[in-house]
Amino acid sequence: MPNDLFEGVDYFQLDDLLTTEHKLIRDTVRQFVKQEISPIIEEYAQKAETPKHLIKGLAEIGAFGPTIPVEYGGGGLDNIAYGLIMQEIERGDSGIRSLVSVQGSLVMYPIYTFGSEEQRRKYLPKLGSGEMIGCFGLTEPDHGSDPGSMITNIKDKGDHYLLNGAKMWISNSPFADIAVVWAKDEEGKIRGLIVERGMEGFSTPETHGKWSLRASATGELVFDNVRVPKENIFPEIKGLRGPLSCLSTARYGISWGALGAAMDCYDTALRYTQQRKQFGKPIAGFQLQQKKLAEMITEITKAQLLVWRLGVLKNENKATPAQISMAKRNNVAMALDVARDARQMLGGMGITGEYSIMRHMMNLESVVTYEGTHDIHLLITGADITGIDAFK
């Protein structure tokens, strides 16, 4: 694989909108990706294995729970810093960003936001340090875009809850130490609880044969009369508001992350076409190649402006779930378009592991589906502007 020569994509001088701390954080993560992820990621993707040896380093650069307060093991950073971290990690690989997103947005965030003080103290520092890895159980075999119809359930047995059901398409599940699980109680209310590996009746079979996110471990969560202590349930939150707020946090990170994948594909295509000669000159000098490159940088720049503004709104607690949906949908679709055009520009070399483009393209086919599909996010926007839910 060629050396990772990426230096950034900033056509509209957006660095001027970032603080010195933002740029330091971004550059630190960028260097980590260059040194630790880029040299090995193709090998791990080819053999469909998660490079778990990266977990310690990811924790050290503050990738786990960047916005969680420092006293609980997080980074105490703002949402733009969080976004930049996701951008740089996904430039390396969407699967590694998935591992990080789940840990911070879907495990640490709900424990911090909805958990008891005892739960925060018990789990968050170990999650932040990477000593413990978590996963998030919402999607079921028969209930994806409609999580409110879940059948996973808990029954009150006095000193504990009895948990039964199954979750599917769960990142990190094969090696996670804990799972944040959403289940219906006997009143039909959705509750969140923390399930620990080793609890009798809890298993995490791995999903094999994926063409996408091959460096990310995916599996199921199976609950067969699992006894969960009452102190493991989130004390107050009930209903879909809990899991959906977690998804909004994760979707925000994805909107930045997909941008990183697009940047990498664009950068690769630009460098390749400047070096590759046909008909006596670099192919970057031909009109159709310049058209593709110009469209790529235009769409990337628009996406950068979108997430920067969204980050400002999120820092001010003004970002709505619908705004986050728009950014996630737009930026992932944009990244897929960039990846497909970049692949064509490299010709046959574009399908090989010598370059990152085909891996990004396959990964993004999962990113466009998880955390709310492309079409569901479109309908979220439609409902927001018309006041009418089209999916109910």
Image (cartoon, helix red, strand yellow):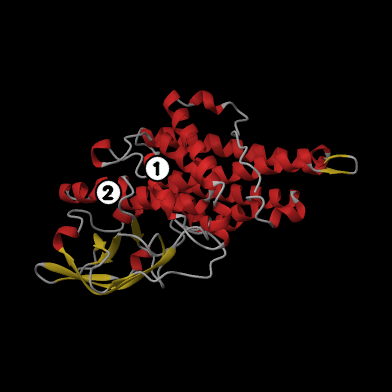
Q: Provide the residue designation for mark 2.
A: 126
Q: Nearer the viewer, residue 83 or 52?
A: 52
Mark toward the start of the polypeptide (2 vs 1)? 1
Residue 270 position by quadrant = top right
Asked if residue 299 lies left or right of residue 115, the reply is right
Relative side of 351 to 84, left or right: right
Q: How busy is the neighbourhood of tag 2: few (under 14 within 10 Å), some, or many (20 plus)?
A: some
78 up-or-down from 260: above or below: above
Q: Residue at x 74, y 49 (%)?
A: 346
Residue type of the residue flagged with mark 1:
Ala
Q: Outermost residue, right direction? A: 279
Residue at position x 30%, y 49% in the image: 127
Badge 1 is on which residue? 63
Picture coordinates of residue 40, whole percent (x, y): 55, 51
Q: Position of residue 269 (x, y in %)?
A: 70, 43
Horizontal and vertical percent for residue 36? 50, 44
Q: Please give the label number shown on residue 357.
A: none
Numbered disc 1: secondary structure: loop
Q: CA distance from mark 2 to mark 1?
A: 13 Å
Specify whether residue 211 is in view.
yes
Around disc 1, counting alpha carbons within 10 Å, would you say few (fewer than 14), some (14 to 19), or many (20 or more)? many
Res. 387 visible in picture? no
Expressed as whole percent of the image width and height from the top left, the position of residue 323 reads 45, 43
Task: Give the residue furthest to the bottom.
Answer: 224
Which of the image's four quarters has the C terminus?
A: bottom left
- Tell which of 334 and 95 is nearer to you: 95
User: In the structure shown, which secondary structural element does the residue marked by tag 2 occupy?
Assistant: helix
Q: Amino acid at mark 2?
A: Lys
